[in-house]
C-alpha cells in the first residue's frame, strides 16, 4: 500500500527542509522483498567496507494500516482502530529509551517494542533483517494486517490518521539520536 514509503518520503522531505541533522541521512528504497530481500542484501554487501562503516542505525517503516476483522459473511470490516504494530529494535538501552519516548510523545498506541531477536527467531521479521545481520542497529516499524498481500489489500486500508504520528515520531527519533 506504500504507506511506509510515503512516510519515509515525508520524513526525508522534513529533514531536507529543516536541515537539522548533523549527520548525513541516507534514504534507500529497495526491491526484492519476496526474493530474499535481494535489494537490501545487495546494497549491504556492496557497501559493507565503505559507506556502512559510518551508519549509526537503519530505520525501516512498513504498513501503517487500519485494523480489520472478518464478519460473519467473511467480509473484512474496519474496527476503527490502528492495526497493532511492532517496533523491532536492536538491544541498546539508549535506542530503546529514545524509541519509547518518541512513540509515547506522538501517541503511537497499539505498538509493542520488540527485540530484533524475537520469538520468531534471531532474524527480525522485517525489511531490516539484512541491516541487523550486518551488525547495524535497527529500528523497524511494521504491522501485519489480515488483508496484507491479499486481493483486499489496497489504499483504503492505509491508516491516514496515523501517518503523521508515525512520521513525527521517527523524525523526532532521528533528531534525538543525531547527537548520540
Image (cartoon, grey):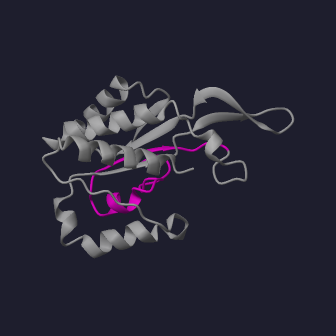
Question: What number of labels is visible?
Answer: 0
Task: Look at the magenta stretch and give its main secondary structure.
Answer: loop
Q: Report if residue 32 lies within the magenta region.
A: no
Q: Tell me the quarter of the picture where residue 7 sits.
A: top left
| x and y percentages locating residue 12 in the rendered image | 31, 48
Side of 63 relative to 175 (left or right): right
Q: Which stretch is magenta?
A: 118-146
Question: In which quadrant is the C terminus drawn?
Answer: top left
Is residue 115 visible in this depiction of the protein?
Answer: no
| x and y percentages locating residue 156 in the rendered image | 64, 40
Q: Residue at x 35, y 60 (%)?
A: 28
In front of the other: 3 or 150: 3
| x and y percentages locating residue 79 in the rendered image | 67, 27
Q: Up-down: is 77 above or below 17?
A: above
Side of 174 relative to 81 (left or right): left
Q: Tell me the quarter of the picture where residue 75 sits.
A: top right
Is residue 99 visible in this depiction of the protein?
Answer: yes
Which residue is the extreme one toward the front? 17
In front of the other: 154 or 100: 154
| x and y percentages locating residue 164 in the rendered image | 42, 33
In front of the other: 14 or 45: 14
Q: Up-down: is 165 above or below 7?
A: above
Side of 175 relative to 44 (left or right): left
Q: Residue at x 12, y 41 (%)?
A: 179
Amino acid at each position: 500500500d506504500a504507506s511506509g514509503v510515503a512516510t519515509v518520503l515525508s520524513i526525508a522531505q522534513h529533514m531536507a527542509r529543516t536541515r537539522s541533522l548533523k549527520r548525513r541521512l541516507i534514504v534507500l528504497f529497495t526491491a526484492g522483498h519476496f526474493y530474499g530481500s535481494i535489494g537490501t542484501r545487495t546494497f549491504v554487501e556492496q557497501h559493507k567496507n565503505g559507506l556502512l562503516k559510518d551508519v549509526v542505525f537503519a530505520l525501516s517503516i512498513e504498513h501503517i494500516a487500519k485494523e480489520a476483522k472478518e464478519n460473519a459473511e467473511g467480509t473484512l470490516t474496519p474496527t476503527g482502530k490502528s492495526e497493532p504494530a511492532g517496533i523491532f529494535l536492536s538491544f541498546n538501552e539508549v535506542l530503546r529509551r529514545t524509541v519509547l519516548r518518541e512513540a509515547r510523545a506522538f501517541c503511537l498506541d497499539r505498538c509493542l517494542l520488540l527485540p530484533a531477536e524475537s520469538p520468531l527467531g534471531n532474524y527480525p521479521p522485517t525489511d531490516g533483517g539484512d541491516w541487523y545481520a550486518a551488525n547495524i542497529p535497527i529500528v523497524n516499524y511494521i504491522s501485519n494486517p489480515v488483508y496484507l498481500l491479499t486481493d483486499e489489500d489496497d489504499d483504503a486500508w492505509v491508516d491516514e490518521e496515523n501517518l503523521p504520528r508515525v512520521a513525527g515520531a521517527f523524525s523526532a527519533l532521528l533528531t534525538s539520536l543525531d547527537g548520540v
